[in-house]
Image: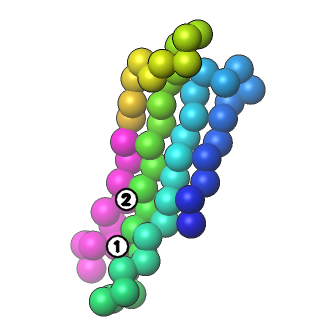
Amino acid sequence: MLDHFFNEEQTSVISRTAIHLKFSDIKLRVADRFLIDEAGQIIEQENYFDASPLRR
């Protein structure tokens, strides 16, 4: 699964994905948030990775 979300002003985009590892029952969630300036350039990036499924 891969989704993209834009805010109303189109100054921020979030891309997220869910990954299911075939060798186990582990499902990972990853999201990246990008701030975009008036010229359409990425000026800041924030990454999120939910590692809680790996802590079992």
Identify which residue is drawn at 45% across, 23% down.
42
Of the 4 image quadrants, the one containing the N terminus is bottom right
Task: Indicate the secondary structure of the residue bearing disc 2.
Answer: strand
Three-letter residue code for mark 2: Asp
Q: Residue lying farthest left?
A: 55
Q: In the picture, residue 54 is in which quadrant?
A: bottom left
Q: Residues within 10 Å of mark 2 (few under 14, many from 20)?
A: few
Residue 51 is inside the magenta segment: yes
Residue 19 position, x and y percent, is 43, 70
Q: Is residue 4 left or right of residue 20?
A: right
Task: Indicate the secondary structure of the residue bearing disc 1.
Answer: helix
Three-letter residue code for mark 1: Pro
Q: In this rendering, is residue 36 above or below 33?
A: above
Q: In this rendering, is residue 16 above or below 19?
A: above
Which numbered disc covers residue 50? 2
| Residue holding disc 1 | 53
**Residue nearer the viewer, 52 or 45:** 45
Q: In the picture, residue 39 is in which quadrant?
A: top right
Q: In this rendering, is residue 47 above or below 26?
A: above
Residue 43 is inside the magenta segment: no
**Residue nearer the viewer, 30 or 36:** 36
Identify which residue is drawn at 57% across, 27% down.
12
Q: Are marks 1 and 2 in contact (CB under 8 Å)?
A: yes
| First to last magenta residue range | 47-56
Identify which residue is drawn at 74% across, 26% down.
8
